[in-house]
Image (cartoon, coloured by chain):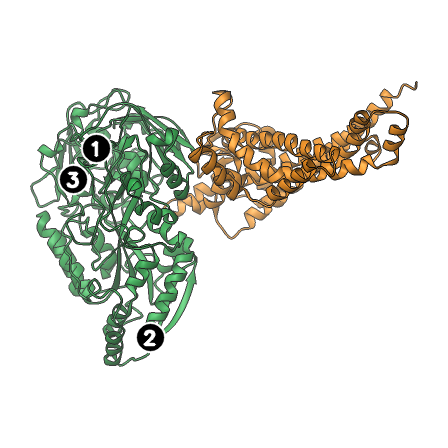
Chain colours: A green, B orange
Amino acid sequence: MTVNRRALAVLAAGALVLTGCAKGGAGGSAPGQASQSPSVAMPTQAGESKQAKVKAGTPQDSQGPAIEVPGSKKGGTVRVIASSDFSHLDPGQIYVSNNAQASELINRGLMGYKQLRNGDVLVVGDLSADTGTTTDGGKTWTFKLKDGVKWEDGEPVTSEDVKWSFERLYDPIINQGPTYVQQWLVDGDYRKTYPGAYSGKRLDTIETPDAKTVVFNLKSAHPDFNMALAMSGYGIVPKKHTMDKSKQKDYDKKPVASGPYRVVSHIGDKSMDLERNPHWDPATDPIRNAYPDKWRFEFGVTAQQSTDRLIADSGDDQTTISINGLGSERIPEVVADGELMKRSISGYTPFTDYWVINTSRVKNPKVREALIKAWPIEAIHKLSGGDAGWGHRASTMMSPTVPGFRKFDVWGQLDNPEGDIEAAKKLLAESGEPNPTIVYAYGSTPLPGKVALLVQEALTKAGFKYVGKKIDSGTWYDSVGQLDNGFDVFRSGWAADWADGSTVMAPLFDGRLIAEGSTNYSQFNDPAVNSAIDEANKLTDPEARGEAWSKIDEQVIKQAAVIPGFYLTYLDLRGSKVWAEMDNWWGSTNLKTAFVAE
Amino acid sequence: MPRDLPYRSAFVIRFLIRRLISAAVIVTVVTAVVFQLFYALPRDPARAFCGRLCLPENLAILRHQMGMDLPVWQQFLVWIQGIFAGRDIPDIGRCEAPCFGYSFAKGEFIRETIVDRLPVTVSLTAGAIIIILTVGVGAGMLAAARRGTWLDSVATSTSNVGGAMQIFFVGPLLVYVLSDTLGILPRPTYTDITASPGKWFVGLLIPWLALSIIFYANYTRLTRSMLLEQLGEDYVRTARAKGLSRRASFFRFAWRGAMIPIVTQVGIDLGVLLTGAVITESTFGFHGLGELTVQAFVNTDLPMLLGVTVIGAGAIVLANLVVDALYAVIDPRVRLA
């Protein structure tokens, strides 16, 4: 999941804001109950106990209703302001997190994310009665649908709907969502093997022995298959309402609901109104509290405008929440104001930002180590607004929200964030290349330019010959994804696709995936790491898997394939008459538990 | 008394026909140039909507749907045909006339989107121009009538301050003072006039006020100077010498003579307000044609950008046509031009 709107916003703004103010800041709190509120506190330091843990739930955890939020009330209209419309609501087309957040109010999948009151997150059965069963190490998976799950027209959700939903993903009209499961169900290139649901052909690797049972016969073992199904892109659609392929664009704006709300109107880039789906039964849903009667989404409100409106807190804005993240220009004002911070929503996002070292160009490990040692991480941290701006200083690739996350600091970046120029010089002397040339690529928005100046200063002091290359931020990933991009070091960001380290370490560091446009930007290819990835993928025990992926993380960091940057954080405000907390999986404002307080 | 009405009417009609033909030519030329420019850009609009997992066959289908498999001149003719007769868009359906095309970014016919957004921009512009004219012209008339008094000084100096400001400064400042601090007015919101005229009016007051502060200065200065000039003209002094009252000479002679440049300025400012809606709507978070233009640009939504540009150009040409017609009413010499 490379799309990182929050980071882009911070990078684009490039505002010089104060640092350190957010440390120990108040967490969000329910109106009128500041001290007892079920808040997720502002993260203080990476690796400490504030970040959420994500793991698989038990069958009991999959049963509804959702856990009550203390002090919650039913009814009213919650208003949401966002800078842009949700580009897709058809589950098959959903990959980016803001679409997924809205989709959760309308669509349901076999699996989903359930947030506990302590902030931890469980992966549980959503339409499925449990988290699925496998008897052969993850090759064959069986899911049973819950009783009482229905579409907004009152028809029951059936196993045929599930099979159809997955078959539909193979059609070329579905061109934005995730592709993992499609590939796991067939041999060879999934686009060429099976033409999709609209061809009239069926996919024989999905069986529906009865109206409530679905069996997936994967081509190889995937013990994390059930976790992958929690992606919003694998939400279920009603066969009856999606058989007309020419209506897909309409469906993408106004899907048929299985969740607590149905779309009443959706005017592109302007507004969306939701009201209760009368056929949604809370007893079947362990994830969604669905307190408000209605939702009113307003699009086209920039982060700065939403922040200003929520600071002013007048009229309808008192029952408004934002999913923009705080306008970076307003961060110092908000974090310094105790009253405003009582209305804040804050926590970690699943993203880690880092600097790629292109190992196909910087081949000497000592030179790579010298880069890390010289890197002015604290200066960049301060420049970008500190913890509440870009995020917390990182020392690993897996973010604290990924199961198995373990804090280690191979290069002493946390202990010595200012960088160690003398150590870098020493390493360069040992490398046999005392003055290597480093081509540093940076984006065309203001902050990357300022960061580049800090990098230039630090690298030059250490003895590197610095060459800066400014490239268009709009085509950033197209440029850096080229194998022969000509860059030695550049920034990137990544988040897990589901609660498993495989979706971080494999796409970023599996050397066998190196290709034009691939996400292994470091072009890192170590047979030992490739082999460790294969071994980790075979593990079925979640804890063992987490441990294995964390070890691979450390293995990669030790080989200096990247310079760890920041665990991204989220900070936003809510109106005084609405309660909203952090969604610890999506790293943004939680829509599932919000309620109008007065 | 000569019966000159048929004679004058014939001139007015011929004058308007000439202007209408030239307006149609201007809109057609603008459309052709814009069309050519957009399609000459080094961007592939079809690729922009083909998705993350774009396959060559999908791209070919999209290019066909967008008509991009035709030569540009043919695409233009199809586009023009759509405006007058409608057209079929492959796999999407019938786009009825006037058809401006289909937005693949929004999944909507462009006409529907424009119809949805137009009232916002028209409300902003129309309300603002009424206030601007009332306040600006009124202050200018007062300053001219009371030349050299404190009223003249106040009207002239405040207009200078207003004219030096920008909407992105005045707008948030008014919101902060009038809404957030004093609580006199609600924060700007747009409510459909048919849903609630009261909410529509109150929600637009701050944007109107902000635009008026910026624009009224021109009218104050212009009205004052033109009136003073006209009041000094021989024909006005002759009228006064023949016993016409000061009030009558002011309104019947001087005022009529001063109107031509004011009407010209209104024509120019209507264009500025319409094109400036990009900034005004962004400042207040309104969803009008200006915001739509920005979104279309960001999303590489060329069909939408084309539709909005042509509508904007048409509106400006129409405004100037009205101004031309007013010239003919105000000044008989114009009809002979």
Q: Earlier in the sequence, mark 1 or mark 2?
A: 1
Q: Position of residue A435 (x, y in %)?
A: 33, 79
As measured in the structure, the alpha-carbon distance from the residue carrying label 1 to the one carrying label 2 is 53 Å
In what element is the residue under mark 1?
A: loop
In what element is the residue under mark 3?
A: strand
Mark 3 lies on residue: A123
- Asked if badges 2 and 3 are on one and the same chain, I answer yes
Residue farthest front in this picture? B150
Mark 1 lies on residue: A33
- Quadrant housing residue A197: top left
- Quadrant housing residue A574: top left
Query: Which of the two marks, 2 or 3, is nearer to us in this view?
Result: 2
Residue A487 visible in rendering: no
Query: Which of the two marks, 1 or 2, is nearer to us in this view?
Result: 1
Q: Earlier in the sequence, mark 1 or mark 3?
A: 1
As measured in the structure, the alpha-carbon distance from the residue carrying label 1 to the one carrying label 3 is 29 Å
User: Is residue A44 placed above or below A286 in the rendered structure?
Assistant: below
Disc 1 to disc 3: CB gap under 8 Å: no
Task: Identify the residue at horizontal 23%, vertical 75% (top origin).
Answer: A423
As measured in the structure, the alpha-carbon distance from the residue carrying label 2 to the one carrying label 3 is 48 Å
- Asked if badges 1 and 3 are on one and the same chain, I answer yes
Question: Which quadrant: the C terminus of chain A?
Answer: top left
Query: Which of the two marks, 1 or 3, is nearer to us in this view?
Result: 1
Left or right: B159 as drawn, with respect to A564: right
Type of residue at label 2? Lys
Type of residue at label 3? Val
Mark 2 lies on residue: A461
User: Is residue A78 placed above or below A427 in the rendered structure?
Assistant: above
Chain designation of label 2: A
Chain designation of label 3: A
| Camera-nearest residue between A186 and A366 | A366
Left or right: B263 as drawn, with respect to A92: right
